Amino acid sequence: MREPPKANMRLTLAIAVLTLALDQASKLAMVDFVLAPPRMIEVLPFFNLVLVFNKGVSFGVFNGDGAWQAWVLSALAVSICIGLLVWQWRHPEGHKALAIGLIVGGAIGNVVDRLRLGAVIDFLDLHVAGWHWPAFNVADSAITLGVLVIICAELLSKRSSQDTRSGEGGVE
């Protein structure tokens, strides 16, 4: 059953704004209070707080010095956000409201950093046996969670659809 587009869009936008606010507040706290002057804080044996200014995209890919990169990556992120919001408006399923809100809020949080600082502030550092996952932030976590929700929901939807079709007209 399709849900009203306006209600789900309000939910999507509310989640996006909340995600954006949490992302920006966490970055402000890390830069101004916790990690000033820049340092590393060991929180757990596998988790540190660090301060990294990432000019590239995920895992530091395209981490060059060109100022144009911030504008191009920001324009790309905003374009993707617009596409996701249009998708949500046209297909207003409940799980997508959550997922797209997380993705849009996280993406806009990173766009704010890029346009304001020319780089994204990353501060979460997971590691094991000397191997470190690239530093990330609340926005990155929200984007990843949103993408996982969409993938899982789509896979479950396809499976449910196949189960329904295989049960129709079958021999009992």
Image: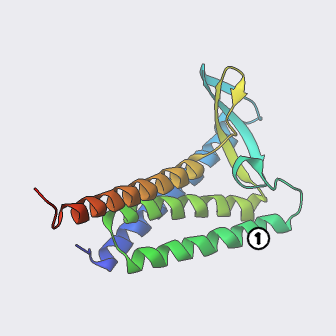
- Quadrant placement of the N terminus: bottom left
Tell me if residue 133 comes above or below residue 107 in the rendering: above
| Outermost residue toward the left in this view | 172
- The picture places residue 20, in percent across and down from the top left corner, at 53, 58
- Give me the residue at 42% from left, 61% from top: 15
- Give me the residue at 25% from left, 58% from top: 163
Q: Is residue 32 left or right of residue 170?
A: right
Tell me which colouring the rendered structure shows: rainbow
At label 1, the amino acid type is: Val
Q: Classify mark 1: residues with Cα within 10 Å, few (<14), some (14-19) or many (20+).
A: few
Q: Quadrant of residue 79?
A: bottom right
Q: Which residue is mark 1?
A: 72
| Outermost residue toward the front in this view | 171
Q: Observer-nearest residue: 161 or 70?
A: 161
> How many numbered discs sit on the rendered protein?
1
Tell me if residue 127 comes above or below residue 82 in the rendering: above
